[in-house]
Image: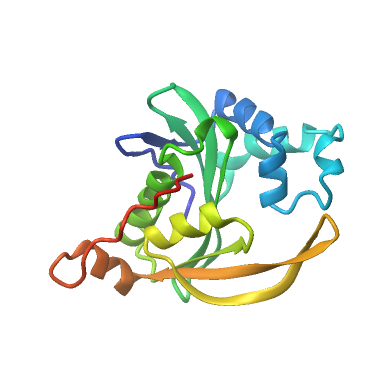
């Protein structure tokens, strides 16, 4: 399903298969405390300051283009000519035509709408080219920026998983969101529903 790794182009970003430059950029991005917190990789603020070994991450990204059951693409910012993050389709269910979506953006790529456009490019690709019926995701309740962006891209809140992350002495919930093909088709057809409002806070 995902052996072919496309390049998806928008006005702000290109989503590209991983190369050496993108791999090095992602290893650096994984040192960002905000990325560590919002991906659930650490459980205290002190852990974000600890020295981590990134050899496994290096190997991980070097092998992304060989994966048949998932799609990992690097986010390339056209303005700065730098790699700023990644987008992923994983947990593919061929029978039910569904995938899970996730995105990670480093500090240099935040606040300029790059994550919003990257998400829309992936959603369009999933429904137009892959024939999906459902794209779902999980986001921590404290990640308000990402939650707002997902909603602006058409994702609907389905529910809440209670206290899935223990961080800095407090439990946090995960929010479950999804977008269905029929939701996406409605957003694409201005006669059926007005286009979603762009997020005022972007990733």
Q: Position of residue 74 (x, y in %)?
A: 51, 37
Residue pictured at 16% horizontal, 64% vertical: 190
Please report the residue visible at 83 percent of the width from the left and 35 percent of the height from the top: 49
Question: Viewed as shown, does residue 191 lie left or right of 132?
Answer: left
| Residue closer to the observer: 21 or 83 | 83
Position of 39 relative to 65 (above/below): below
- Residue 100 in the image, given as x and y percentages of width and height: 54, 62
Q: Would you place residue 105 above or below residue 131 in this image? A: above
- Residue drawn at x 38%, y 35% is 13
Q: Quadrant of residue 194?
A: bottom left
Q: Is residue 93 visible?
A: yes
Q: How is the image coloured?
A: rainbow
Residue 60 versus residue 82 in the image, above or below = below
Return the residue found at the far left. 191
Question: Residue 196 in the image: x percent, y percent?
Answer: 30, 61
Residue drawn at x 51%, y 34% is 109
For the residue pair 72 and 153, the one nearer the viewer reads as 153
Q: Quadrant of residue 57?
A: top right
Left or right of 77? Residue 145 is: right
192, above or below 4, in the image: below
Instruction: Name the foreground residue: 49 vs 89.
Output: 49
């Amino acid at each position: 399903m995902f052996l072919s790794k496309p390049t998806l182009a928008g006005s702000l970003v290109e989503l590209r298969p991983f190369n050496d430059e993108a791999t090095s950029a992602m290893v650096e991005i994984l040192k960002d405390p905000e990325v560590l917190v919002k991906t659930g990789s650490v459980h205290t603020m002190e852990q974000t300051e600890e020295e981590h070994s990134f050899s496994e991450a290096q190997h991980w990204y070097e092998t992304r283009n060989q994966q048949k059951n998932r799609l990992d693409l690097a986010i390339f910012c056209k303005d700065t000519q730098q790699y700023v993050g990644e987008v992923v389709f994983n947990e593919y269910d061929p029978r039910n035509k569904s995938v899970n979506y996730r995105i990670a953006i480093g500090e240099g790529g935040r606040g300029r709408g790059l994550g919003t456009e990257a998400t829309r490019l992936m959603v369009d690709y999933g429904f137009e080219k892959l024939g999906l019926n459902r794209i779902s995701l999980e986001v921590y309740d404290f990640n308000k920026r990402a939650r707002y962006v997902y909603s602006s891209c058409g994702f609907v809140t389905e529910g809440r998983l209670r206290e899935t992350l223990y961080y800095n002495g407090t439990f946090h919930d995960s929010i479950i969101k999804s977008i269905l093909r029929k939701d996406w088709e409605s957003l694409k057809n201005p006669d059926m529903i007005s286009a979603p409002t762009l997020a005022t806070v972007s990733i």
